[in-house]
Image (cartoon, helix red, strand yellow):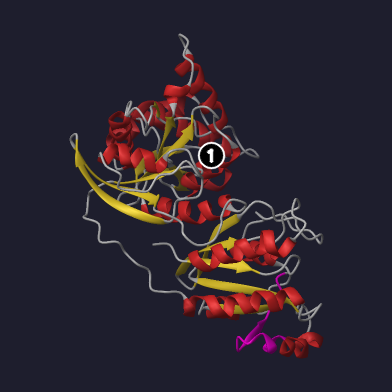
Amino acid sequence: MSRIVAIVGRPNVGKSTLFNRFVEERKAIVDDMSGVTRDRNHGTVEWNGQFFTLIDTGGYVPESNDVFEKAIREQVHIAIEEADVLLFMVDVETGVHPLDIEFANILRRAHDKVVIAANKMDNNLRINDVFDFYELGFGDILGVSAINGKGTGDLLDRITELLPEEEHVPFEVDIPKFAIVGRPNVGKSSLVNALLGKNYNIVTPISGTTRDSIHTRFKAFGQDIYLIDTAGLRKKAKVQDNLEFYSTLRTIRAIEECDVALLLIDATQGLESQDLAIFQQILKNRKGVMIVVNKWDLVEKETNTARDYAKKLRERMAPMSDVPIVFGSALTKQRLIKALETAKQVYDEKTKRISTSQLNEVMIPIIERHHHPAVAGRIIRIKYVTQVQDVSIPTFLFFTNHPKHIKESYKRYLTNKLRENFGFSGVPLNVFFRQK
């Protein structure tokens, strides 16, 4: 189970800057104007061999006249319920703010693992300003500078001390784990209910009823798998305005636990930006993936409707467009078994091994027909390829005399040729180059 740390705090205290530093990517837009964090950012952090998922909660919704009540409070409540540790950021430059006090009152009552980071301590002149925040009632305050990194190592030490031990669900070995994921209200729980033949999960037409990941052993129609569904009833906070943020937390955990993700999309709405974000999250976690176009019974059909629909989907998923697509309906149970069979095929592709002799017999002639162009007068030669064993996804090593000079375009070329000759539909591939 993924461990989640959520950054909370009022607008413009440096949450996104710290997020970028920790995940070592400039994913969040950083600006001095409050309210620039509108999409919910998340990334994986590694510190001294420990891993956790970091969520940047933002803190401002431009359509809201009441910033705290309609935006910050909802996100904090969701973060409190879902995160293992809360990183509460304050600003030594402005001192204790009324919103900081509001935050503190909520967090003290609701969560026992809160770390306060007093940001913008860019020089030692502000050390004494940190003491002002002791009035919030959380004990030690860690002074940091998200911009220059001062104090962030101590902060990460403190966070990892508070993280729970990683939980390992006692799955039986060699049984595929399929996660049913998608944006809210596309029919995830309805799909599980249709497969299981009973109302195993609570389904309502209102977005936001999903609560906890449920792992169901499914043995029917020749299948023996685990279904991972983020299903159940959300009973506490309202989530309508921040449903995407809430759904992101649940989806991350489901994806990280699975072997293959079945990404449901709504046939009547097509592939939207949130669907693409989930798709990228699946690829980033190096999981197998297939698309289930749900509610296909609601689409008016013509001769080539499915073919044209699939073509448009693949164009939007490029460059990872070799993904199986199944058109079905949870309501009518159309092609649901086909979807599971296809997911099992993706799992088989993900675990497939190609012998070294077969790889070289196929790939070396392809390389000889289309050599890598010379770089600064250096002739690039690739002489040997092998598949790495005991890794989670198919990984290939190409041995060359100049691995650092292999262009990304040629790497894509080799990846495409591997797919053309050996399959791997719906599976991300790793391609690396090593010194011959």
**Horizontal and vertical percent position of residue 82:** 49, 64
In terms of image quadrants, where is residue 203? top left
Q: Residue at x 53, y 75 (%)?
A: 110
> Which residues make up the magenta segment?
133-146
In terms of image quadrants, where is residue 417? top left
**Horizontal and vertical percent position of residue 409:** 57, 34
**Horizontal and vertical percent position of residue 377:** 63, 38
Q: Residue at x 50, y 31 (%)?
A: 413
Q: Read off the residue under disc 1.
A: 275
Q: Is residue 276 above or below residue 313?
A: below
- Which residue extends farthest top? 303
Q: Residue at x 38, y 69 (%)?
A: 166
Is 138 magenta? The answer is: yes
Quadrant holding the N terminus = bottom left
Q: Residue at x 57, y 42 (%)?
A: 274
Does residue 318 appear anywhere in the picture? no
Q: Nearer the viewer, residue 408 or 239?
A: 239
Does residue 203 appear anywhere in the picture? yes
Q: Nearer the viewer, residue 14 or 299?
A: 299
